[in-house]
Amino acid sequence: MIKAIVTDIEGTTSSLSFVKDVLFPYARAHLPDFIRNHRAQTEIKPLLAEAKEIAGGELDEEALIAQFIHWIDTDQKLTPLKSLQGLIWQDGYRNGDFTGHVYEDAVRNLRNWFGLGYKLYVYSSGSVQAQKLLFGYSDFGDLTPIFSGYFDTHIGGKKEAISYEHIAAELGLPAEQILFLSDIKDELDAARQAGFATCWLVREQVPDAGAEHVQVSDFDGIHL
Ligand SMILES: CSCCC(=O)C(=O)COP(=O)(O)O
Ligand SMILES: [Mg+2]
């Protein structure tokens, strides 16, 4: 019996296009000045140091900026990049440059499940701050009250079964009582390996006849 639902964001609650065509370009455009203006701040310094370590070289500031831009362009799910993006997007949301895209069917069903007593969580490669911003400044207003918690790459990569084991431990629930929603098969495979129930959102994809996961075209197809 499902007691909690953990949802991915990009491609699941929210469109790929919002992330790729709105969020990533905004971060790409503002990242150079953001680093130049905030490099000495206590919140930023460790992110820059971690990024340099991942890049594996003694990068000066401009080379580091170029490295970050390359990581954005190649959609790398690296924790310091994701944290930095969250900080940059904060201004965009607060200034009203954009609101967080969430599909209507996702909002309606998440609200319904919340009302029925299911615990709702988010697990995304985007930082916890970025997740809270997207749902806090969503097209449907502030959706954060319906969520009980958020997980990002600090708990581990989304294609690693151990990450889902850690999430189940944090939730204090047996894995089989947790439903994971995602648009990426490798993530669903990892969750299934950890014992989670899974559901594959195939909104903009062709369904895969051979897949082990339940496939739905939107949240209306999910039956708990
Ligand atoms: C949290 S909003 C930005 C989404 C993002 O940066 C990203 O990498 C999407 O990853 P997801 O795990 O939600 O597919
Ligand atoms: Mg996704």
Image (cartoon, grey):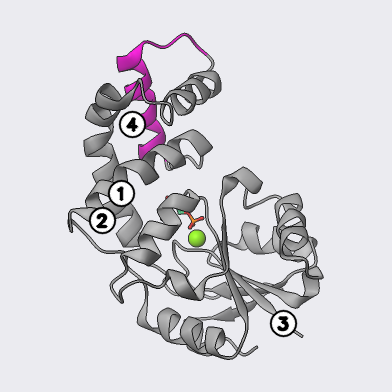
Tell me which numbered mark, 2 or 3, is placed earlier along the sequence.
3
Tell me residue 68's x, y (percent).
38, 29
Which of label 4 and label 2 is nearer to you? 2
- Mark 3: few, some, or many residues within 10 Å (few <14, many ≥20)? some
For the residue carrying disc 4, how many other residues have a C-alpha within 10 Å: few (<14), some (14-19), or many (20+)?
many
Q: Position of residue 217 (x, y in %)?
A: 48, 81
Q: Earlier in the sequence, mark 4 or mark 2?
A: 4
Mark found first going from the N terminus, 1 or 3: 3
- The residue beneath circle 3 is 2
Answer with mark 4 or mark 1, whichever residue precedes in sequence.
4
Q: Position of residue 117 (x, y in %)?
A: 62, 86
**Label 1's element?**
helix
Circle 1: residue type: Gln
Disc 1 to disc 3, C-alpha distance: 34 Å
Residue 210 at least partly seen: no
Find disc 4 in the rendering and name its residue. Answer: 69
Query: Element under label 3?
Result: loop
Q: Quadrant of the C terminus?
A: bottom right
Closest to the camera, between mark 3 and mark 4, is 3
Q: Look at label 2 and name its amino acid.
A: Tyr
| Residue under numbered circle 2 | 93
Q: Quadrant of the N terminus?
A: bottom right
77 shown above or below 178:
above
Whether the residue under disc 4 has CB within 8 Å of ligand 1: no
Residue holding disc 1: 90
Disc 3 and disc 4: Cα gap in Å?
41 Å
Residue 161 visible in the picture: yes
